[in-house]
Each structure stands twice: as C-alpha cells, then as structure tokens.
Image (cartoon, rainbow, N blue to C red):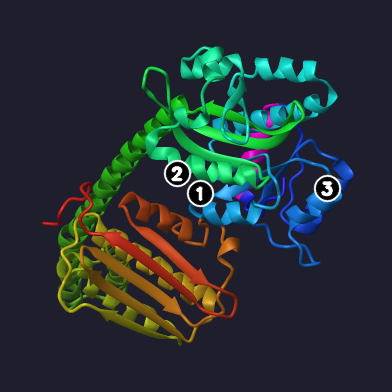
Amino acid sequence: MAEDDADAAECLRGCIEQIGYSVAVCAEGSEALRLVREWRPDLVLLNAILPMVPEGRSVGKCLREHFDVPILCLVESAAVPDALAAAADLGPIGYLVKPFDPGMVSRMIQAAVTCVQTRQSLRESVERYQRIFESLRDAVFVIDREGHICEANPAAAEQYGYTLEQLTSMTVDQLVHPNCRHILKRFMADLHAGRTAYCESVDVRSDGAALPVQVQAVPFTWKGEPHFLGMIRDVTQWKRAQQQVLEHQQRLRQLVLELSTAEDRERRQLAEDLHDRVGQTLAAVQMGLQLLRATSLDAPQRVLVEENLQLLRQVAKDTRTLTFELYPPALREHGLAAAVEALVDQFAAASSASLQLDYDQSPLPLPEPLPGLVYRCVRELISNAMKYSRAEHIRVYLRGIGDRMRVVVEDDGVGFDPRTVDLAGRTGTGFGLFSIRERMREVGGTLKVDSRPEGGTRAELDIPLHNPGLRSAP
C-alpha cells in the first residue's frame, strides 16, 4: 500500500489484516517500487496523486512499465475528478474513496482480489471463468461495445429482478435511472478508451425501485471479440447504514454541544460566585485584619497579623486568577471583544512581541456557548504563537460577516508543516489545534491553519452565529 496519509494508511492496514491479508505500507514512490519488487504482491493500493519518484515519473507509470500487478487507486472524496484524471493512464481495477468506511474497505478489497482472480482464471480456462462468474455475489455483466448485455450471472438476475434471458435481451442503459444516463455516457467512454471504469450511480429494478450501486468495469476479450466485464454492487444497505451513522453523529454533536453549553454556564456561575461571594468575603477579612493591625498590639501579635495579611493577599490573588481562568470578568461584563482586548494586553505585557487587535466596534450578539469557547480558542492560539513561533508581530482579528463570525490569529514567526502537528492536540495546555478543531465542529464551525516553515502561521476560525443548537445569550 502506497499512501502518504498516515491515518488513512493505518485504517486500511487494519481492515486488510482483519480479513486475512498481509500488507506492507509505505508513503513514498521509491519505497513503493522497492516493496513491489521484493514482495511481488497480489494487489497494490496506490494513492493516485502520490508524489513522483526521483526520476520525475509517476509511481503508477513505473509500476505499469516494470510490474504486472493490479492497482486499486485511493482517492480523496473532495478531489475525485483530479484523482481520476491522475489515475487515468494506470488502468486501476477500482477505487476506494476517502474517508474510508471499514466495512466498505473490506468488501472492496475482497471484490478487487476476486476481480484479479477472475481475470487470471479467464486466461487459464473458460470453465474456471464460468464457475467464478456464476459464484460471485455481486451482479456481473458481459457487455459488448454497443452496450448490449451478452451474459449475466445469477446474482445480477436476483439483484435486478429479471430472468437471465430477459437481461441478455436488454442494453445497459435500460437498467440505468434516467437521471443518471450522463454518468453511463462517461463510464462507457472510459471503457471504449481502454481504461478501467468506476462510478457510483442509481439503477432501476424490474419493479421500478431505485437501486443505488457502485459499478466498475474493465475491457476484456470474450469469445475472441472486445467486450467489457462489469461488476455492479448493490449499496442500498450501505447507504442506509451511512445515513444512520450521519444521523447518529448529528445527535452526538448536538449532545456534545449541549454539554459544552452547560459547562460554559457552570464556569460562568462559578466565576460569579467566586467573585461576588468568596472575593467579597476575603476583602472584608482583609479590611478587618488591617484595622486590627492599626490597634495597639505587641510585637508578636503584629507579626502574626502581618503574616495572616500576606497569606490572605495570596489567597485573594489566587481567587482572582481562578475566576479569570473559569470565566474572565471582562467577558461576563463587557463581551468577547473587550475580553480579548484585555487578553492581548496581558500577553503583550509579558512578551517582547508586538500584539495587535482589530475588531468590529459594534458588539456581536453571540449565543451561548460561543463567547467562552471563542475566548479560550483565541487564548490558545495566541499562546501557541508566543511559545513556538518566535514571532515579532502577532495580529488578532474579530469580524462579523453576515451571519458568521470570523476570528484570525496570524504571526510572522518560523511557521511549521501542518502535517506534523500532534493530532492529539497535546501542545502543553491540553487545548491544542485538534481540540480547537473539534470544538469548532461542535458548533458548526471550522478551523483552517495555513503555515509553512519560515513563512509564518495564520489560523482562522469560521463560526455560524445561528446554529439551531445554540442558545442566545441573555
């Protein structure tokens, strides 16, 4: 497996090993070629846009030139067209689209291996091909270059609700939903160009029911003539399960958001109690001790009173610090912009770097728990810049743009490679980039980090102000 995304590679490794296959993993083109040369694998899982080998050629082309090994391309869901274009000349037997679903990965790997075995069996004997052809659980068709179905397996008849005789009197476009005919056109164009084709589409059963499918097909020779061999997988159950997972994730995010709101409310209440009750009590005790110190006391009593006053001052200072950590008074009394302004002043006083804040003068109506959440994210981003960037200038922007809020923290420091950031978010405070990204996701927002070595860093928070799960601040 040649994949430079470590998380994706580890996910695929687990899935493949779980179904009984051995796998070697690498992240570079040259290493991929070396492993293929040593292992002689049955299948190569290849990132379609993996960086080129030193000679300037793509990994896939090198594999095609020097090894007779089937390729299953790994593509990003957000960049499928680019990845398909990059893989066009590789002749892959199929594609796996990120993010990977473990069940689908297992099924796709099994299907890919089965497809490889089928191609080999076709070369060995027609009888062996026919046995495998009929035993497959996915629908399989042999199609001529005009799209007529020449042969179909029993699974195809069961999947589409036709008899084998009916299927072999039809064309493939009769099985495709009218809204997906354009997909079929591109699919057939790839096959006519001699390429392996893959698509997701919607077909129609004999009873008119829609049938979500994943389709892959390859050109091959059948009875001495050029044909196409296509495998169609019914993904109805997978689509339904995927929707259930999405609904479950949405419910989970809503629960996390409610917990976050409750946490913020408790922080605010504790801060108010510390300030209004404990703080006032400590102030009263301090005044009493100061009055006592002004009376006629002998030397030992005066020393004792002074020691208690010093201890009380430290307790009062610790209480103010704790109040500030829980929920800054400026945030509670004057809003986010004033609290961030005080935070910037606090960091500036403790650093030689220049800190600048730019914000909208009109206050934004932030629903809970956004004020406390955004404040803690900004504090973490500034803290990271102060600790690690060695920047001379740090700028913070707070902007309301329509129904969204945008927060930017940027510096002119040493920068970093975002791919090397500790994904667990352990940056010393326990609230690193990973945690910020997760907190943003809870409220429907995003964190975008742009950085490069010696090029400074820009971290941007984009937050919707009207998420239905948010509660307007009183």
- The residue at the point 23 percent across, 54 percent down is 270
User: Total number of numbered labels?
Assistant: 3
Q: Is residue 28 above or below residue 45?
A: below
Circle 2 Cα neighbour tier, 10 Å, few/some/many (<14 / 14–19 / ≥20) = few
Q: Quick one: label 1 or label 2, which is nearer the N terminus?
A: 1
Within the magenta stretch, is there residue 17? yes
Question: Residue 382 falls in which quadrant of the image?
Answer: bottom left
Q: CA distance from mark 3 to mark 2?
A: 40 Å
- Relative image position of residue 357 (x, y in whole percent): 31, 81
Q: Quick one: label 3 or label 1, which is nearer the N terminus?
A: 3
List the residue tagged with mark 2. Answer: 182
Circle 1 Cα neighbour tier, 10 Å, few/some/many (<14 / 14–19 / ≥20) = few
List the residue tagged with mark 1. Answer: 77
Q: CA distance from mark 1 to mark 2?
A: 20 Å
Residue at disc 1, secondary structure: helix
Q: Relative to 334, is 38 on the left or the right? A: right
Question: Residue 279 falls in which quadrant of the image?
Answer: bottom left
- Relative image position of residue 347 (x, y in whole percent): 38, 78
Q: Which mark is residue 35?
A: 3
Q: Amino acid at mark 2?
A: His
Q: 268 or 302: nearer the eye?
A: 268
- For the C terminus, the quadrant is bottom left
Q: Relative to 243, is 2 on the left or the right? A: right
Q: Amino acid at mark 1?
A: Ser
Q: 75 or 157: nearer the eye?
A: 157
Within the magenta stretch, is there residue 105? no
Disc 3 to disc 1: CB gap under 8 Å = no
Callout in the foreground (3, 2): 2
Give the magenta range. 7-19
- For the N terminus, the quadrant is top right
Q: CA distance from mark 3 to mark 1?
A: 27 Å
